[in-house]
Image (tube, rainbow, N blue to C red):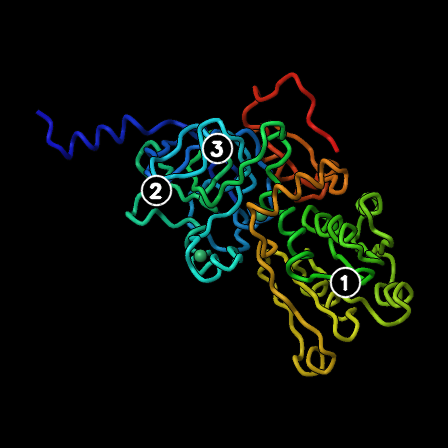
Amino acid sequence: MQTNTAAVKDAKVKNSMKVKAAVVNGVNEKYEMEELTLSELRADEVLVKVVATGICHSDEALRIGDAEYPMPAVFGHEGAGIIEKVGSAVKDLAVGDQVVMAYDYCGTCPSCRTGHPSSCKDWTPINFGSPRSDGTYIFTKADGTPVSNFFNQSSFSTYTITYANNLIKVDSETDLRLVGPLGCGLLTGFGTIVNGLKPETNSSIAIFGTGAVGLGALMTAKIEGCSPIIAIDIHDSRLERAKELGATHTINSRVENLEERIAEITGGIGVNYSIDTTGISSVMKSSLDILTIGGSTVPLAVTPNSLEFNPFTELTLNNRKVVGVLMGDAVPQLAIPKLIQYHKEGKFPFDKLVKFYKFDEINEASEDSNSGKTIKPILIIDEDYRKDEPVMES
Ligand SMILES: [Zn+2]
Ligand SMILES: [Zn+2]
Protein backbone atom coordinates (compact mmCIF):
# COMPACT_ATOMS: atom_id res chain seq x y z
CA MET A 1 0.00 0.00 0.00
CA GLN A 2 1.20 3.52 -0.82
CA THR A 3 1.95 5.99 1.89
CA ASN A 4 0.26 9.38 1.63
CA THR A 5 3.53 11.02 0.69
CA ALA A 6 4.08 8.55 -2.12
CA ALA A 7 0.55 9.11 -3.36
CA VAL A 8 1.08 12.87 -3.44
CA LYS A 9 4.38 12.40 -5.25
CA ASP A 10 2.71 10.16 -7.82
CA ALA A 11 -0.04 12.70 -8.35
CA LYS A 12 2.56 15.40 -8.95
CA VAL A 13 4.40 13.29 -11.47
CA LYS A 14 1.15 12.38 -13.17
CA ASN A 15 0.11 16.03 -13.43
CA SER A 16 3.45 17.25 -14.72
CA MET A 17 4.00 17.35 -18.46
CA LYS A 18 6.77 17.27 -21.01
CA VAL A 19 7.48 20.42 -22.97
CA LYS A 20 9.92 21.42 -25.68
CA ALA A 21 11.99 24.42 -24.61
CA ALA A 22 15.00 26.38 -25.84
CA VAL A 23 17.46 26.05 -22.96
CA VAL A 24 20.60 28.10 -22.31
CA ASN A 25 22.98 25.89 -20.33
CA GLY A 26 25.76 28.41 -19.74
CA VAL A 27 27.00 31.88 -20.61
CA ASN A 28 27.48 32.33 -24.34
CA GLU A 29 26.12 28.89 -25.17
CA LYS A 30 23.60 28.61 -27.94
CA TYR A 31 19.96 27.80 -27.29
CA GLU A 32 19.42 24.08 -27.23
CA MET A 33 16.08 22.46 -27.88
CA GLU A 34 15.42 20.11 -24.97
CA GLU A 35 12.55 18.16 -23.55
CA LEU A 36 11.88 19.41 -20.03
CA THR A 37 9.38 18.48 -17.37
CA LEU A 38 6.91 21.22 -16.53
CA SER A 39 5.80 20.91 -12.92
CA GLU A 40 2.21 20.31 -11.87
CA LEU A 41 0.08 23.46 -11.64
CA ARG A 42 -0.37 25.16 -8.26
CA ALA A 43 -3.55 26.92 -7.15
CA ASP A 44 -2.22 30.39 -8.00
CA GLU A 45 -0.75 29.46 -11.38
CA VAL A 46 -1.88 29.40 -14.99
CA LEU A 47 -0.78 26.96 -17.69
CA VAL A 48 -0.37 28.67 -21.07
CA LYS A 49 0.13 27.05 -24.46
CA VAL A 50 2.59 29.42 -26.10
CA VAL A 51 1.65 30.45 -29.64
CA ALA A 52 4.51 32.84 -30.38
CA THR A 53 7.16 34.89 -28.66
CA GLY A 54 9.38 37.83 -29.44
CA ILE A 55 13.09 37.70 -28.72
CA CYS A 56 14.17 40.73 -26.72
CA HIS A 57 17.68 42.09 -26.25
CA SER A 58 17.38 41.28 -22.55
CA ASP A 59 17.14 37.57 -23.36
CA GLU A 60 20.33 37.91 -25.33
CA ALA A 61 22.04 40.13 -22.73
CA LEU A 62 21.60 37.36 -20.17
CA ARG A 63 22.59 34.59 -22.55
CA ILE A 64 25.87 36.32 -23.41
CA GLY A 65 26.54 37.26 -19.79
CA ASP A 66 26.05 41.04 -19.85
CA ALA A 67 24.14 40.46 -16.63
CA GLU A 68 24.42 37.42 -14.38
CA TYR A 69 21.74 34.79 -14.37
CA PRO A 70 21.41 31.32 -12.81
CA MET A 71 21.80 28.77 -15.62
CA PRO A 72 20.50 26.54 -17.07
CA ALA A 73 17.55 28.77 -17.88
CA VAL A 74 14.59 29.09 -20.19
CA PHE A 75 14.40 32.72 -21.29
CA GLY A 76 11.70 34.43 -23.33
CA HIS A 77 9.49 37.16 -21.93
CA GLU A 78 7.48 38.43 -24.89
CA GLY A 79 5.12 35.51 -25.19
CA ALA A 80 1.51 35.25 -26.31
CA GLY A 81 -0.63 32.19 -26.01
CA ILE A 82 -3.82 30.47 -24.99
CA ILE A 83 -4.74 29.49 -21.46
CA GLU A 84 -4.78 25.72 -21.16
CA LYS A 85 -5.50 25.32 -17.44
CA VAL A 86 -6.20 27.67 -14.54
CA GLY A 87 -5.26 27.09 -10.89
CA SER A 88 -8.17 26.93 -8.44
CA ALA A 89 -7.31 30.29 -6.80
CA VAL A 90 -7.03 32.28 -10.05
CA LYS A 91 -9.87 34.70 -10.76
CA ASP A 92 -10.95 36.39 -14.00
CA LEU A 93 -9.04 34.10 -16.35
CA ALA A 94 -10.42 31.02 -18.08
CA VAL A 95 -9.36 28.13 -20.25
CA GLY A 96 -9.27 29.27 -23.89
CA ASP A 97 -8.54 32.93 -23.13
CA GLN A 98 -6.03 34.56 -25.45
CA VAL A 99 -3.29 36.28 -23.48
CA VAL A 100 -0.19 38.37 -23.90
CA MET A 101 2.42 37.67 -21.22
CA ALA A 102 4.39 40.44 -19.54
CA TYR A 103 6.37 40.53 -16.30
CA ASP A 104 5.13 39.45 -12.86
CA TYR A 105 4.64 41.61 -9.76
CA CYS A 106 3.34 41.04 -6.24
CA GLY A 107 0.21 43.19 -6.57
CA THR A 108 0.08 44.15 -2.91
CA CYS A 109 3.12 46.36 -2.11
CA PRO A 110 2.72 50.17 -2.10
CA SER A 111 4.17 50.55 -5.63
CA CYS A 112 1.89 47.87 -7.08
CA ARG A 113 -1.13 49.34 -5.33
CA THR A 114 -0.40 52.80 -6.69
CA GLY A 115 -0.15 51.67 -10.29
CA HIS A 116 3.62 51.20 -10.58
CA PRO A 117 4.05 47.44 -10.75
CA SER A 118 7.50 47.68 -12.35
CA SER A 119 8.59 49.35 -9.09
CA CYS A 120 7.28 46.33 -7.16
CA LYS A 121 9.38 45.74 -4.05
CA ASP A 122 9.92 42.15 -5.14
CA TRP A 123 10.39 42.81 -8.85
CA THR A 124 13.88 41.35 -9.10
CA PRO A 125 13.38 38.11 -7.12
CA ILE A 126 9.98 37.51 -8.73
CA ASN A 127 11.16 37.98 -12.30
CA PHE A 128 14.76 36.83 -12.19
CA GLY A 129 14.76 33.12 -11.88
CA SER A 130 14.10 32.41 -8.23
CA PRO A 131 12.34 29.15 -7.45
CA ARG A 132 8.83 29.20 -6.04
CA SER A 133 8.53 30.04 -2.34
CA ASP A 134 8.56 26.32 -1.48
CA GLY A 135 11.88 25.92 -3.32
CA THR A 136 10.53 24.01 -6.33
CA TYR A 137 11.17 24.91 -9.95
CA ILE A 138 8.69 25.08 -12.78
CA PHE A 139 11.08 23.47 -15.28
CA THR A 140 13.38 20.52 -14.60
CA LYS A 141 15.57 18.35 -16.81
CA ALA A 142 15.10 14.58 -17.10
CA ASP A 143 17.93 14.04 -14.58
CA GLY A 144 16.21 16.36 -12.09
CA THR A 145 18.42 19.43 -12.70
CA PRO A 146 16.33 22.53 -11.98
CA VAL A 147 16.08 25.07 -14.79
CA SER A 148 15.57 28.76 -13.99
CA ASN A 149 12.60 30.52 -15.45
CA PHE A 150 12.50 34.15 -16.51
CA PHE A 151 9.95 36.90 -15.80
CA ASN A 152 7.81 34.04 -14.45
CA GLN A 153 6.88 33.29 -18.04
CA SER A 154 9.80 31.62 -19.91
CA SER A 155 8.09 31.83 -23.25
CA PHE A 156 10.79 29.92 -25.19
CA SER A 157 8.76 26.80 -24.48
CA THR A 158 5.76 25.05 -25.99
CA TYR A 159 3.89 25.37 -22.69
CA THR A 160 4.68 27.42 -19.63
CA ILE A 161 3.42 28.09 -16.15
CA THR A 162 2.78 31.70 -15.30
CA TYR A 163 0.72 33.91 -12.97
CA ALA A 164 -2.38 36.06 -13.25
CA ASN A 165 -0.34 39.27 -12.89
CA ASN A 166 1.76 38.28 -15.91
CA LEU A 167 -1.27 37.91 -18.12
CA ILE A 168 -3.12 40.44 -20.23
CA LYS A 169 -6.29 39.09 -21.73
CA VAL A 170 -6.83 40.17 -25.34
CA ASP A 171 -9.91 39.72 -27.48
CA SER A 172 -10.43 36.64 -29.59
CA GLU A 173 -9.80 38.56 -32.84
CA THR A 174 -6.28 39.53 -31.82
CA ASP A 175 -3.62 37.63 -33.74
CA LEU A 176 -1.39 36.07 -31.10
CA ARG A 177 1.42 35.53 -33.59
CA LEU A 178 2.06 39.26 -33.63
CA VAL A 179 1.39 40.70 -30.19
CA GLY A 180 3.97 39.07 -27.87
CA PRO A 181 6.52 41.91 -28.23
CA LEU A 182 3.95 44.27 -26.73
CA GLY A 183 4.77 42.58 -23.41
CA CYS A 184 8.29 44.00 -23.11
CA GLY A 185 10.18 45.91 -25.80
CA LEU A 186 7.28 47.90 -27.18
CA LEU A 187 5.71 48.39 -23.76
CA THR A 188 9.04 49.80 -22.61
CA GLY A 189 9.28 52.20 -25.55
CA PHE A 190 5.69 53.32 -25.16
CA GLY A 191 5.72 53.69 -21.37
CA THR A 192 9.05 55.52 -21.29
CA ILE A 193 7.35 58.27 -23.26
CA VAL A 194 3.90 58.41 -21.67
CA ASN A 195 4.84 57.59 -18.07
CA GLY A 196 8.55 58.34 -17.82
CA LEU A 197 8.96 61.57 -19.78
CA LYS A 198 5.36 62.81 -20.25
CA PRO A 199 6.37 65.20 -23.06
CA GLU A 200 4.37 68.35 -23.77
CA THR A 201 2.98 68.74 -27.30
CA ASN A 202 5.64 70.06 -29.67
CA SER A 203 8.51 69.23 -27.35
CA SER A 204 11.65 67.95 -29.03
CA ILE A 205 12.95 64.44 -28.56
CA ALA A 206 16.01 62.51 -29.74
CA ILE A 207 16.08 58.73 -29.76
CA PHE A 208 19.42 56.92 -29.93
CA GLY A 209 19.13 53.49 -31.49
CA THR A 210 16.24 52.44 -33.70
CA GLY A 211 15.62 48.91 -32.51
CA ALA A 212 12.24 47.78 -31.21
CA VAL A 213 12.40 49.81 -27.99
CA GLY A 214 13.62 52.95 -29.75
CA LEU A 215 11.01 52.66 -32.48
CA GLY A 216 8.28 51.92 -29.93
CA ALA A 217 9.26 55.17 -28.22
CA LEU A 218 9.38 56.95 -31.56
CA MET A 219 5.88 55.87 -32.63
CA THR A 220 4.60 56.93 -29.21
CA ALA A 221 6.39 60.29 -29.39
CA LYS A 222 4.48 60.88 -32.62
CA ILE A 223 1.16 59.92 -31.02
CA GLU A 224 1.94 62.32 -28.14
CA GLY A 225 2.63 65.19 -30.54
CA CYS A 226 6.39 65.58 -30.08
CA SER A 227 8.19 67.62 -32.72
CA PRO A 228 10.90 67.45 -33.87
CA ILE A 229 11.43 63.71 -33.42
CA ILE A 230 15.07 62.95 -34.15
CA ALA A 231 16.19 59.36 -34.74
CA ILE A 232 19.89 58.60 -34.43
CA ASP A 233 21.54 55.40 -35.63
CA ILE A 234 24.54 54.25 -37.64
CA HIS A 235 22.60 52.41 -40.37
CA ASP A 236 20.85 54.38 -43.11
CA SER A 237 18.34 51.60 -43.75
CA ARG A 238 17.20 51.76 -40.15
CA LEU A 239 16.96 55.52 -40.30
CA GLU A 240 14.78 55.24 -43.40
CA ARG A 241 12.39 53.02 -41.46
CA ALA A 242 12.43 55.46 -38.54
CA LYS A 243 11.34 58.16 -40.97
CA GLU A 244 8.45 56.02 -42.20
CA LEU A 245 7.35 55.57 -38.59
CA GLY A 246 7.39 59.24 -37.68
CA ALA A 247 10.92 60.62 -37.30
CA THR A 248 10.97 64.20 -38.57
CA HIS A 249 14.77 64.17 -38.74
CA THR A 250 17.41 61.46 -38.82
CA ILE A 251 21.11 61.56 -38.03
CA ASN A 252 23.62 58.93 -39.05
CA SER A 253 26.09 59.52 -36.23
CA ARG A 254 28.78 57.51 -37.98
CA VAL A 255 29.07 60.02 -40.80
CA GLU A 256 27.41 63.18 -39.47
CA ASN A 257 28.45 65.46 -36.62
CA LEU A 258 25.82 64.83 -33.97
CA GLU A 259 26.19 68.07 -31.98
CA GLU A 260 26.14 70.21 -35.10
CA ARG A 261 23.06 68.50 -36.48
CA ILE A 262 21.18 68.73 -33.15
CA ALA A 263 22.06 72.42 -32.91
CA GLU A 264 20.86 72.97 -36.47
CA ILE A 265 17.55 71.14 -35.89
CA THR A 266 16.80 72.74 -32.49
CA GLY A 267 17.96 76.29 -33.23
CA GLY A 268 21.00 75.80 -31.01
CA ILE A 269 19.17 75.04 -27.76
CA GLY A 270 19.24 71.23 -27.62
CA VAL A 271 16.39 68.78 -27.12
CA ASN A 272 13.83 68.61 -24.33
CA TYR A 273 14.01 64.83 -24.10
CA SER A 274 16.29 62.03 -25.15
CA ILE A 275 16.33 58.27 -24.84
CA ASP A 276 19.32 55.99 -25.21
CA THR A 277 18.67 52.38 -26.18
CA THR A 278 22.27 51.48 -27.07
CA GLY A 279 23.86 51.20 -23.62
CA ILE A 280 27.20 52.42 -25.03
CA SER A 281 28.87 54.82 -22.58
CA SER A 282 29.75 57.49 -25.15
CA VAL A 283 26.24 57.38 -26.64
CA MET A 284 24.55 57.61 -23.24
CA LYS A 285 26.79 60.62 -22.60
CA SER A 286 25.77 62.20 -25.91
CA SER A 287 22.13 61.75 -25.03
CA LEU A 288 22.79 63.77 -21.86
CA ASP A 289 24.97 66.37 -23.59
CA ILE A 290 22.41 67.29 -26.24
CA LEU A 291 19.70 68.18 -23.71
CA THR A 292 18.47 71.72 -23.46
CA ILE A 293 18.31 73.41 -20.04
CA GLY A 294 15.66 71.58 -18.05
CA GLY A 295 15.78 68.53 -20.31
CA SER A 296 15.54 64.86 -19.31
CA THR A 297 17.25 61.77 -20.62
CA VAL A 298 16.41 58.12 -20.05
CA PRO A 299 19.16 55.49 -20.46
CA LEU A 300 17.17 52.34 -21.21
CA ALA A 301 19.50 49.54 -22.26
CA VAL A 302 20.38 46.46 -20.24
CA THR A 303 24.09 47.24 -20.16
CA PRO A 304 27.20 46.62 -18.06
CA ASN A 305 28.53 50.07 -19.08
CA SER A 306 28.53 53.22 -16.97
CA LEU A 307 27.39 56.76 -17.63
CA GLU A 308 29.73 59.26 -15.99
CA PHE A 309 28.99 62.91 -15.45
CA ASN A 310 29.55 65.71 -12.99
CA PRO A 311 26.24 66.10 -11.15
CA PHE A 312 26.75 69.80 -10.45
CA THR A 313 27.95 71.13 -13.80
CA GLU A 314 26.06 68.70 -16.00
CA LEU A 315 22.79 68.27 -14.10
CA THR A 316 22.14 70.79 -11.32
CA LEU A 317 23.46 73.83 -13.12
CA ASN A 318 21.17 73.07 -16.06
CA ASN A 319 18.19 71.61 -14.26
CA ARG A 320 18.72 68.42 -16.24
CA LYS A 321 17.51 64.99 -15.22
CA VAL A 322 18.75 61.47 -15.83
CA VAL A 323 15.72 59.26 -15.28
CA GLY A 324 15.47 55.50 -14.77
CA VAL A 325 12.32 53.92 -16.21
CA LEU A 326 11.78 50.16 -15.98
CA MET A 327 9.34 48.47 -18.36
CA GLY A 328 7.90 51.87 -19.20
CA ASP A 329 6.55 52.24 -15.63
CA ALA A 330 3.30 50.99 -17.14
CA VAL A 331 0.51 48.75 -15.91
CA PRO A 332 0.67 46.07 -18.61
CA GLN A 333 -3.04 45.19 -18.22
CA LEU A 334 -3.95 48.77 -19.19
CA ALA A 335 -1.16 49.62 -21.63
CA ILE A 336 -1.19 46.54 -23.85
CA PRO A 337 -4.87 46.69 -24.87
CA LYS A 338 -4.26 50.37 -25.62
CA LEU A 339 -1.32 49.50 -27.88
CA ILE A 340 -3.42 46.88 -29.67
CA GLN A 341 -6.07 49.53 -30.24
CA TYR A 342 -3.43 51.99 -31.53
CA HIS A 343 -2.20 49.26 -33.86
CA LYS A 344 -5.71 48.70 -35.21
CA GLU A 345 -6.00 52.43 -35.84
CA GLY A 346 -2.70 52.41 -37.73
CA LYS A 347 -0.97 54.65 -35.18
CA PHE A 348 1.38 52.02 -33.83
CA PRO A 349 2.38 49.93 -36.87
CA PHE A 350 4.78 47.65 -35.01
CA ASP A 351 4.10 44.81 -37.46
CA LYS A 352 6.56 46.62 -39.74
CA LEU A 353 9.40 45.77 -37.33
CA VAL A 354 8.71 42.07 -37.18
CA LYS A 355 10.16 39.03 -38.89
CA PHE A 356 8.82 35.54 -38.17
CA TYR A 357 10.93 32.45 -37.56
CA LYS A 358 10.21 28.86 -36.65
CA PHE A 359 10.88 27.90 -33.03
CA ASP A 360 13.80 25.70 -34.12
CA GLU A 361 15.40 28.73 -35.78
CA ILE A 362 15.89 30.52 -32.46
CA ASN A 363 19.68 30.74 -32.77
CA GLU A 364 19.46 32.21 -36.26
CA ALA A 365 16.74 34.62 -35.13
CA SER A 366 18.91 35.83 -32.24
CA GLU A 367 21.89 36.30 -34.52
CA ASP A 368 19.75 38.32 -36.93
CA SER A 369 18.56 40.46 -34.02
CA ASN A 370 22.08 40.98 -32.67
CA SER A 371 23.49 41.88 -36.09
CA GLY A 372 20.65 44.31 -36.73
CA LYS A 373 19.36 42.34 -39.72
CA THR A 374 16.02 41.86 -37.96
CA ILE A 375 14.56 44.44 -35.62
CA LYS A 376 12.11 42.19 -33.82
CA PRO A 377 12.26 38.45 -34.38
CA ILE A 378 9.14 36.51 -33.45
CA LEU A 379 9.28 32.75 -33.05
CA ILE A 380 6.13 30.93 -34.05
CA ILE A 381 5.87 28.13 -31.53
CA ASP A 382 2.43 26.76 -32.35
CA GLU A 383 2.50 26.48 -36.13
CA ASP A 384 -1.11 25.31 -36.27
CA TYR A 385 -2.47 28.56 -34.87
CA ARG A 386 -4.47 30.31 -37.65
CA LYS A 387 -2.32 28.36 -40.08
CA ASP A 388 -4.29 29.41 -43.15
CA GLU A 389 -4.65 33.06 -42.31
CA PRO A 390 -2.07 35.74 -43.08
CA VAL A 391 -0.75 37.61 -40.06
CA MET A 392 -2.74 40.72 -39.18
CA GLU A 393 -1.16 43.91 -40.46
CA SER A 394 -1.79 47.50 -39.58
ZN1 LIG B 1 4.55 44.73 -5.57
ZN1 LIG C 1 12.61 42.52 -22.76
Label 2 Cα neighbours within 10 Å, binned few <14 / some 14-19 / many ≥20 = some
Amino acid type at circle 2 is Tyr
Is there any visible trace of residue 361 in the rendered image?
A: no
Amino acid type at circle 3 is Ser
Confirm or deny contact between disc 2 and disc 1 (CB under 8 A): no
Query: Distance between the Cα atoms at labels 2 and 1?
Result: 46 Å
Q: Which residue is mark 1?
A: 200
Q: Is residue 77 above or below residue 268?
A: above
Q: Position of residue 242 (x, y in %)?
A: 80, 47
Q: Residue reaching furthest top?
A: 388
At 78% across and 75% down in the image, what residue appears? 293
Task: Return the residue nearer the eye: 15 or 334.
Answer: 334
Q: Secondary structure at mark 2?
A: loop
Amino acid type at circle 1 is Glu
* Left or right of 143 on screen, residue 100: right
At 86% across and 64% down in the image, what residue appears? 262
Q: Residue reaching furthest front?
A: 92
Asked where in the image residue 337 lies, by quadrant, the reply is top right
Q: Is residue 333 above or below residue 113?
A: above
Q: Which residue is mark 3?
A: 157
Query: Distance between the Cα atoms at labels 1 and 3?
Result: 42 Å
Q: Position of residue 129 (x, y in %)?
A: 42, 48
Is the shortest distance between ligand 2 and the CB of mark 1 under 8 Å?
Answer: no
The disc, 2 or 3, on the residue closer to the chain's N-terminal end is 2
